[in-house]
Image (tube, rainbow, N blue to C red):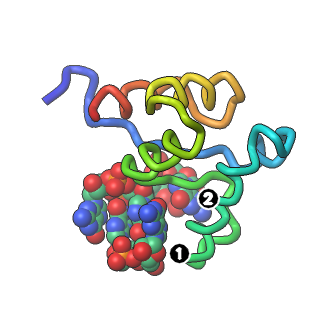
Amino acid sequence: PSPLGPTPKLVIDLERLAQLPKEKAGPLARYAATIQSQRGDYNGKVLSIRQEDLRSLAVIYDKSPSELTEELISWGVLDAEARRAVEAF
Ligand code: C2E
Ligand code: C2E
Ligand code: C2E
């Protein structure tokens, strides 16, 4: 086991996401909305997503998972802890 504890979750800040310009946030916002709809999870301020979903999103954004993670951290959509979740890939 890691000395830093279990792998952190990927938690999307939905309020921050809603503040970002559509050109940047559009694909992620649609992806998150689809997951919310599939779960029936509409009232959250945050959304925990699967590690697999970050891989899919990286393809959509034409970046590596770690590059996309850095971008989402810089936008304030992911917490810096998310780096450790992606290192576990
Ligand atoms: P599914 O993948 O067949 O999952 C069925 C149910 O198993 C989910 O119903 C949920 O209750 C549980 N489940 C599966 N994986 C996890 C997990 O990692 N953590 C937790 N806490 N529960 C899990 P639910 O939530 O109603 O989702 C229905 C369907 O919506 C899922 O069927 C899946 O097809 C899709 N879905 C929901 N959330 C996600 C997501 O974050 N990513 C992806 N790719 N699909 C999702
Ligand atoms: P946590 O994972 O640290 O989540 C803290 C709070 O963030 C949750 O409080 C909830 O208000 C919010 N949150 C996180 N992910 C989501 C999401 O995908 N959708 C929504 N709507 N809110 C989210 P909450 O619900 O009172 O849960 C408290 C703790 O209970 C969680 O802490 C976690 O440790 C556990 N828990 C709740 N649901 C699940 C689950 O599906 N799977 C697992 N393994 N633990 C869960
Ligand atoms: P979590 O519920 O704490 O689950 C942590 C990890 O346990 C998941 O990481 C996954 O590797 C495994 N796991 C949990 N439940 C299942 C399951 O039913 N089937 C399988 N095959 N694996 C399972 P992962 O996939 O990265 O998901 C991270 C978090 O995203 C989950 O934390 C949960 O908060 C959320 N999530 C993912 N998929 C779903 C889903 O279908 N429905 C809901 N409601 N939440 C989900």
Task: Report the quarter where the N terminus lies.
Answer: top left
User: Helix, strand or loop at disc 1?
Assistant: helix
Using the rendered view, name the quadrant where residue 47 is placed.
Answer: bottom right
x 70%, y 68%: residue: 43
Mark in front: 1 vs 2: 2
Q: Secondary structure at mark 2?
A: helix
Does residue 82 appear left or right of residue 5 in this picture? right
Percent across and percent down for residue 64 are: 45, 29
Label 2 sits on residue: 31
Q: What amino acid type should be assigned to the residue bearing mark 2?
A: Tyr
Dot placed on the residue nearer the N-terminal end, 1 or 2: 2
From the top left corner, tell me how far across and down residue 75 is, in percent.
71, 28
> Does 84 appear above or below 53?
above
User: Does ligand 1 reach within 8 Å of label 1's beta carbon?
Assistant: yes
Q: Nearer the viewer, residue 64 or 49?
A: 64
The quadrant in which the C terminus is found is: top left
- 64 shown above or below 3: below
In the rendered view, does 57 fall on the left or right side of 7?
right
Q: Say which residue label 1 marks.
A: 39
Q: Nearer the viewer, residue 73 or 41?
A: 73
Looking at the image, in which quadrant does ligand 1 appear? bottom left
**For residue 24, what is the image quadrant?**
top right
Packing grade of label 1 (10 A; few <14, some 14-19, many >=20) is: few
- Packing grade of label 2 (10 A; few <14, some 14-19, many >=20) is some
Q: Is residue 46 above or below residue 62?
A: below
Q: Is mark 2 within 8 Å of ligand 1?
A: no
| Point 19% across, 25% down: residue | 2
37 lies left or right of 1:
right
